[in-house]
Amino acid sequence: MNNSLFTHWGSWFTLVAIVLLTTWLNRDLDKKLPHFPQPVRANPDYTLTDFKTVRMDPTGQLVNQLEAEKMVHYPNAETQLQKPSLIFYKQKQATWFVNAERATVSPDGNTILFLGKTTFFRPATPRHQRLTIISENVQVNKLTQVAETQAAAQLLTDASTTHSVGMRFQLTVEHLELYSQVRGHYVVQ
């Protein structure tokens, strides 16, 4: 009986020693690791519905127009958009339409990250056929008019379908770079 009592108290002693040692090591390690401030989610300072903004060039010509069903602005942080639509213009003509489920806009307003399903659309012109690009999580720089994603992308025309993983697209010169796993289906007319 004395032996079982010693084993019982010995187990408790071992358990308490392990708990104390773990606590001491955790505190000691915690002192050595750098601490980064936790981001504080501020309350929005304003919210707009049926939001619309335009950007003009130095001569007063329309460059792009950004609209959203709802815009939520946070001080010193990214702005949140619901159902955003971005239209690029060239010589007073709408050249590209970009739509997504939601987006975030950088504090300087120049970079938009379209989140969820994102669609680029170029209507048919005398020089180009209609083109639709479908992807997700696409970052667009409004100043350079460059769009980029690492996600899967699908390019659709009346006569072709092309798939890739990742792309970089310069809208002004319509230069498209497909990153990997490119495959396509073309119908010769």
Image (cartoon, helix red, strand yellow):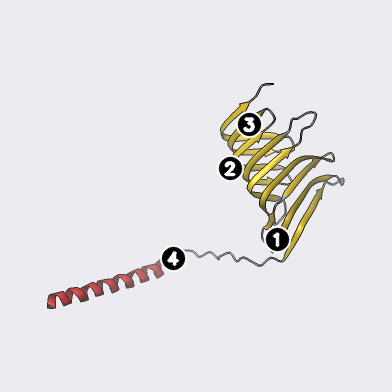
Q: Residue at x 30, y 70 (%)?
A: 18
Q: Secondary structure at mark 3?
A: strand
| Placement of the N terminus among the 4 image quadrants | bottom left
Residue 13 percent location from the top left of the image: 25, 75
Alpha carbons under labels 4 and 1: distance apart? 39 Å
Q: Secondary structure at mark 2?
A: strand
Q: Which residue is mark 1?
A: 72
Identify the amino acid type marked 1: Val
Q: Residue at x 70, y 30 (%)?
A: 158
| Image disc number at residue 150 | 2
User: Callout 4: few (<14), some (14-19), or many (20+) C-alpha neighbours within 10 Å?
Assistant: few
Q: Say whether marks 2 and 4 touch (CB < 8 Å).
A: no
> Considering depth in this image, is 33 or 48 the residue closer to the camera?
48
Asked if residue 84 is positioned above or below residue 29 in the image, the reply reads above
Q: Say whether marks 3 and 1 touch (CB < 8 Å).
A: no
For the residues carrying marks 4 and 3, which lies nearer the camera in this image? 3
Alpha carbons under labels 4 and 3: distance apart? 55 Å
Q: Residue at x 73, y 48 (%)?
A: 85
Q: Earlier in the sequence, mark 2 or mark 3?
A: 2
Identify the amino acid type marked 2: Gln
Q: Residue at x 18, y 73 (%)?
A: 7
Residue 119 percent location from the top left of the image: 68, 42
| Image disc number at residue 161 | 3
